[in-house]
Image (cartoon, grey):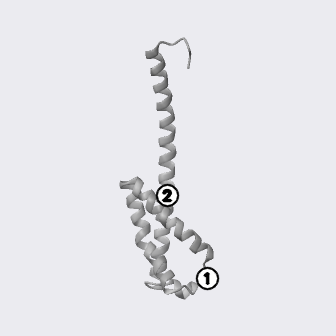
Amino acid sequence: MRLGLSPDKRDNEISMRINQFTKKNRRLDSAILIAFVLAFTVATFNHVMDIMRGGLFPYSKWYGASESLNFYWTSLTLLDPLAIVLLIYNVRAGYILAFCIMLTDVPINYRAKPPA
């Protein structure tokens, strides 16, 4: 900002800089949102394919998963697409659900026994 500007011109320059900043943030927000939607789309596809190959609760056969863990992983077949819908139509709720899914799923996947 230049010191010699009148208040109106200074306010206009500040507004222009704010608009440039928010445009950059909108692009970043959109990129993050697209990444989340793509990730949950792939996850949904994987869970659907697991169910198609191994039945409704396939994970006990492959991983020796307990009933509760098997139920959790199978429930992601519904929760992942719900996260996609929420991310598209209600971004805040979508991010909350996505965070909750990742907060629980990532540590579970990390500790899961790999398929034989």
Identify the residue at image location x=46%, y=69%. Answer: 44
Q: Secondary structure at mark 2?
A: helix
Q: Nearer the viewer, residue 21 or 44?
A: 21
Q: Which residue is mark 1?
A: 115
Q: Any mark on residue 36, and which?
A: 2
Image point (45%, 21%), residue name = 11
Q: How many marks?
A: 2
Where's the N terminus, which quadrant?
top right
Closer-to-camera residue (52/76) = 76
How packed mark 1 is, by other alpha carbons closer than 10 Å (few <14, some 14-19, many 20 or more), is few
Q: Please state the horizontal and vertical placement of residue 43, each as a whole percent of the image.
A: 50, 68
Residue 60: give its label. Answer: none
**Amino acid found under the numbered disc labelled 2:** Phe
Instruction: Decide which of 6, 94 is in the foreground and name it.
Output: 6
Asked which secondary structure carries label 1, the reply is loop
Residue 104: x %, y % from top left: 52, 70
Considering depth in this image, is 74 or 10 the residue closer to the camera? Answer: 10
24 lies above or below 110: above
The quarter of the picture where the C terminus appears is bottom right
Residue at 47% across / 12% down in the picture? 6
Which badge, 2 or 1, comes first in the chain's sequence? Answer: 2
Q: Residue 46, image x and y in percent?
A: 50, 72
How far is disc 2 from disc 1 in space, using C-alphas?
Answer: 26 Å
Label 1 sits on what residue type?
Answer: Pro
Q: Tell me where residue 83 sits by quadrant.
A: bottom left
- Residue 60 x/y as whole percent: 53, 87
Instruction: Work out whether 31 lies above or below 12.
Output: below
Give the class, few, some or many, for how many residues have Cα within 10 Å of label 2's Cα (few <14, many ≥20): some
